[in-house]
Amino acid sequence: MTVKQSIKESLTNLVWWREMITIVIGCAMCAVGFVFFINPYNIVPGGVYGMGIVLHNIFPSIQVGTFGYMMDIPLLTIAIILFGKQFGGRTLFAAFITPGIMNIISAAVYPTKEALQSLDPSQLMGGAINLSDHLMLACILGGTIIGAGLGLVVRSNATTGGTDIIAMILNRYLHIPFSRGVLMADSFVVLAGLIVIGFGVGIDGGEAGGWLLSLYSLICIFVTSRVIDYVIDGASYDKLLFIIGNTHSEPLRQYIINDMERGGTYIKASGMYSKDEKEMIFLVVSRREVAQVQRKIREIDPTIFLVVTDAYDTYGEGFKPFPEKDAMLND
């Protein structure tokens, strides 16, 4: 199939349109969460936009969304060079429109250029949404809206780029788990916020009690991650996969072992109706890896039968350690 045919097929596919609209809605929700509940209070919830908030305090004439572009464009360029086709066009789309929407909303809700540069919450919407005395509420509302938006984007097989790209690079070249890579990148951003905003390094002076903003930032990160989990998969975390095929699939085996760095179990099975012998793979993955397996199966053999179910608890190498003996007795 040529590129022209692929584009034409996408434009006439209702599922594609629905997912693209979902991405736009998700990106808009992220922008709203930042503009109304995060940026005005100097909360730094990790990611490129968290770093954008830090840099905006040093260079107030440049908006947070613009800093997002300044960091995302190099990261996206590196990702395309390193990962090629693995790095989807939807992520490029989401990463480019989110800062733009953020800048447009910011310009619309602040009355003057000076208010826009200072991100003064007392002038946001005429002071109608001033939560300066309720930072915990701002954290929860902002984290919830941003998490819901990011969840919609991820459900549509995209991300907003940023620290996800850094985590992907760390995973490929330093073999650091993806989730740990995201944590490391976000921790660096929060630390930068503590130094610049809390202690006033690089600006006229830190805010009174500004170091507390780092605690609010951690709360916001926690709320955001929980909401993302809920939007993507409800309350579930790990996923149990039953992959049933008519023949042995060596490419799928190699992908699971080498690319995903997971292990699985072969189980002998047979069809109830045909009585033909089949091969079943028993596999446990994280919620983020399910889409990867689905895409690979579609690429290798679309006739494979796949069942995805929740894994309530998963113990062992690559997952949670077994509980201590005393803990099991207490249960």
Image: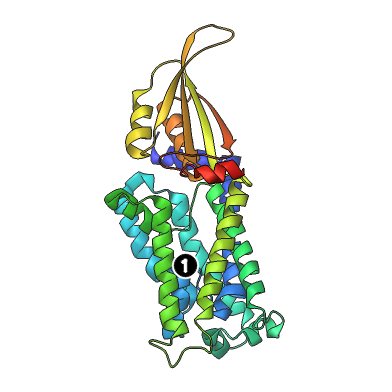
Q: Is residue 183 above or below residue 273?
A: below
x then y, percent, for residue 256 = 38, 33
Say left or right for 236 vs 256.
right
In the foreground, 320 or 267: 320
How is the structure coloured here?
rainbow
Residue 216, by quadrant, is bottom right
Q: Is residue 204 above or below residue 260?
A: below
The extreme bottom residue here reads: 204
In the foreground, 24 or 210: 210
Say left or right for 176 vs 138.
left
Q: Does the image show residue 90?
A: yes
x then y, percent, for residue 207 = 51, 88
In the foreground, 142 or 86: 142
Q: Residue at x 46, y 41 (%)?
A: 289
The quadrant of the image that shows the N terminus is: top left
The quadrant of the image that shows the C terminus is: top right
Q: Is residue 283 above or below residue 201?
A: above
The extreme left residue here reads: 173
Q: Residue at x 39, y 62 (%)?
A: 184
Say left or right for 255 vs 280.
left
Q: Does the image show residue 67?
A: no
Q: Residues within 10 Å of mark 1 (few under 14, many from 20)?
A: many
Q: Residue at x 57, y 67 (%)?
A: 220
Q: Is residue 57 above or below residue 89?
A: below
Q: Which residue is mark 1?
A: 46
Q: Amino acid at mark 1?
A: Gly
The extreme right residue here reads: 128
x then y, percent, for residue 135 = 63, 77
Q: Secondary structure at mark 1?
A: loop
